[in-house]
Amino acid sequence: MAAHDNSEDPNYDVDVLIVGAGPTGLALAAQLAAFGASFRIIDRRQTPGTESRAIAIQPRTLEALRPFGISGELVSAGRPARELHLHLPEETLEVDLFDTGLEDSAFQQLLFLSQTETERILTQHLLSRRVRIERGAELQDLERLDPEDPFAGMEAKIQRMDRGIERIRARYVVGADGAGSTVRAKAGMDWRGGAYPETFILADVEIEGAEPDAVHSYPTEDGFLFLFPLGGAATWRMISIKPPRKPATLETLQGLADTFAHGALKVHDPRWISTFRLSHQMAEYFQRGSVFLAGDAAHVHSPVAAQGMNTGIQDALNLGWKLALGARGLASDELIDSYHAERRPVDQEVVSSTDRIFRLAISRNGLKKLPRTKLLPALAPKAMGWDGLRARLFRTMAQLNVNYRGSSIVESGPSRRPALLASGPQPGDRLPDADVIYQDRERRLQDLVSMPGFSVLLTGPGWPQDAVPQLHAALPGLAGLLNVQYLTVGSSLIANAPGIIKDVSGLAFHRLGLSSRRAELLVIRPDGYVGYRSSGRDITGAVDYLQRLTSGPAAGV
């Protein structure tokens, strides 16, 4: 049994029951384990999946998974794609990928890796934390522990293939069980959207004639063909619209390659061929009482721009720390409720934008296909030469531009300059990264604030010597969950002292919009976003902010 399977509250068997052990559920488990929360993770499949499915990992996902010590392993196992080869009728346009706009991240690449491998690496991490995935365990039903109180927790009825029916009482239940989510259905959460009429064919194959380590796109009047480099048993992932009345065979794949690439490609040795339908659907709410949805259980969309698995992992890492604090009685109702408020607008934009792009890519209607067949060849060469546009496009695709500025759980101090006049990340923005020096070692700033809990950065001159103990004394409930450090601009020759991060290059100060002549304070949330920011050396606003978020008891506590 997992080391995290017993709750200290006798009313519950566990704090969190995770249903589904795909990338979303596994990432959620990793974060809960880091916080020491009690949880169980179940999956109806008896063995891990073998299909490659999602294959692209975005820079922000690699950043978010880095605290678990697995991002380096993911990078080593995958294949980075440095270029997009856009095969237009008159020319092939070679576009550098992620060569601009990602300077404030340690990961400046689009990484291709089979979902099977991603899940394996996440699973190995959990095993190192003595967490066991319970396979062959299928959710049958959900019932409230208190029919009158939707926040009092849930009892899950589990059908186990090895020992019959089991009932698990959980403070929170998270559905990470895919588009056909049983959790969503049993909780009565609406699922809205529609399906695309086309059937698509997908295969992991070997291909001759395609330059390696690049994404290849072949847009024509008949639709599109995409080739993605894979890290794993097969070299290429191939995807296109399936021709009507054609079987899913190697012959069909070669026919598609001939149609779109005019005989330049030879397809052979398929490892896996599948047909599927795509849809764009979304849950109306991501939370109902003690039940939450994440990943494909909350939203599904086309694979355009490789956002799906990455969005699900971001859901998990937005939710996990909130539930972990809730389990300790350290989360206000507002903090727990903020998951839906923060993530649904982000995910809605992903669903909407990928739907618009995908319809342009597949449409065969005379007018709707014009952007693909006429405008793209005419405008793409010029657009790709505009560095500002490319930088913004790559940051959006990499999910570095995701922010929660409108959230109720981020705020600016009263002395902070208005957003229009201030530079650097605003409350709700991701904390940018940079190389710094800590205890005579070169480190990344994000690594130094990625502990399970909140981090406070004190910057600029004049901080009193007792600022750090004052913060800890004012927030005794966050013992072990509060990390306070000084960020200074200075030479690497300056003497080290505990809790001092030295920005020798000045890049961290520049990216954060800081000045060596002006004192500021930043509170970094456990998911790597700026929660609070103020000017001056008054810690009162930061203390009030953290007390508001962690006042407890949370809903269901």
Image (cartoon, rainbow, N blue to C red):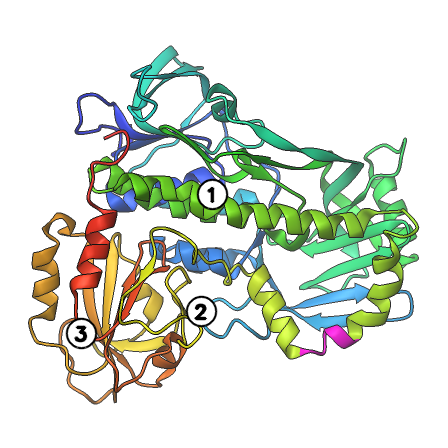
Residue 86 found in image quarter: bottom right
Residue 207 visible here: yes
| Residue ID for mark 1 | 120
Q: Amino acid at mark 2?
A: Ala
Identity of the residue drawn at 34% across and 56% down: 410
Disc 3 residue type (three-letter):
Arg
* Side of 486 where 170 appears, left or right: right
Q: Which residue is mark 2?
A: 106
Classify mark 2: residues with Cα within 10 Å, few (<14), some (14-19) or many (20+): some
Q: Magenta stretch containing residue 231, yes or no?
A: no
Q: Could you say whether the residue bearing mark 3 is in a helix, strand or loop?
A: loop
Residue at 43%, 60% in the rendered image = 63
In three-dimensional space, the C-alpha distance between marks 1 and 2, rounded to whole angstroms, equals: 23 Å
In which quadrant will I find the C terminus? top left
Pick whichever, 322 or 29, lies toward us.
322
SS of the residue at dot 1?
A: helix
Instruction: Tell me residue 179's x, y (percent).
Output: 58, 31
Q: Residue 370: image x %, image y %?
A: 88, 57
User: Magenta region, mostly helix, strand or loop?
Assistant: loop
The boundaries of the magenta stretch are: 382-386
Q: Which residue is mark 3?
A: 537
Judge whether 115 appears above or below 216 on screen: above
Dot in front, 3 or 2: 3
Q: Earlier in the sequence, mark 3 or mark 1?
A: 1
Front tag of 3 and 1:
3
Is 379 on the left or on the right of 320, as rendered? right
- Spatial CA span between label 3 and label 1: 46 Å
